[in-house]
Amino acid sequence: MNELKEYTEKLFEDIKHIDEDGNEYWEARELQQVLEYTQWRRFENVISKAKLSCENSNINIVDHFADVGKMVDIGSNTKRETKDYRLSRYACYLIVQNANPKKKMVALGQTYFAIQTRKQELSEKEYSELTEDEKRFYQRDLTRKGNYSLNIAAKNAGVKNFDRFHNSGYKGLYNGETANDIAKRKKLRYREDILDNMGSDELIANLFRISQTEQKLNNTKITGEINANKIHYTIAKNIREVIAKNGGTMPEKLPTPEKSLKEIEKENKKIEKR
């Protein structure tokens, strides 16, 4: 049973994808095979039940079940578009909860996703026991999710130039520095992610900027790109002023870790292979 459990966990991770923004997702067609559903129509019924569970929890379905289509070969140099979904971890969790528990892979999937979801909800005591690098990974995951939600709020407010929008926040928090300025100061390579090269304290400051801006945009129904940029800058600047008032270290003065999170991930993967 333990061997089967380990195999299942590895299988779920093997079909996980990472998009260009570093967000993890699963494809429904691949999950269908793992959960041993031979017919798509039956599996789509499970997805429909999972969507309903999501909706009943007052959670936006689109954020977790994204409709996507794929072109597949059907012979004679002909392709046909087939329906698929891009699923979040939470969506996968809801799917296995609504799937047939008599299937062994479903039962193991229920345990797997419940455990993995719980790992992302650390108590204060659990967090304090993490190493600095573990705290960085934890906070980076939160900022990644936060930025995803912030982008949705910004888009709803009318933002089209997201680089300018995010730089408005950086300028407020970093005393006028843009993302490129921060990268240069940290001596990063071209297009290297600045958030992957921050310590946990710096990530927390940015997470606060992100979450407060998202709340402001959603709660006040701000409209117009100029207004959204101004709100982002003002909130970030206010956070900077609070840090100064409390005698804290300014974000640009915080040390840059010796290794980026991506470098640490690569090293960990090499160790695992050995």
Image (tube, grey):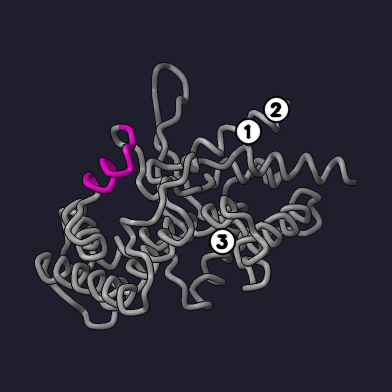
In reply to whether residue 183 is colored magenta, the answer given is: yes
Kindly tell me whether residue 98 is visible in this rendering: no
Q: Main secondary structure of the magenta part?
A: helix
Q: Residue at x 51, y 55 (%)?
A: 88
Read off the residue under disc 2. 273
Dots 2, 1 in contact, CB < 8 A: yes
Q: Report whether 38 appears left or right of 214.
A: right
Q: Nearer the viewer, mark 3 or mark 2?
A: 2
Q: On residue 23, which mark appears?
A: none
Query: How would you rate the neighbour count of disc 3 (Cα within 10 Å): few for under 14, some for 14-19, many for 20 or more?
Result: some
Read off the residue under disc 3. 90
Query: How would you rate the neighbour count of disc 1 (Cα within 10 Å): few for under 14, some for 14-19, many for 20 or more?
Result: few
In reply to whether residue 206 is colored magenta, the answer given is: no
Question: Height in image: 9 above or below 211?
Answer: above
* Mark earlier in primary sequence (3, 1): 3
Q: Residue 171: x, y in percent?
A: 20, 60
Q: Residue at x 45, y 45 (%)?
A: 83
Give the magenta part as a residue range: 180-189
Nearer the observer, 34 or 219: 219
Read off the residue under disc 1. 269
Dots 3, 2 in contact, CB < 8 A: no
Q: Residue at x 78, y 39 (%)?
A: 7
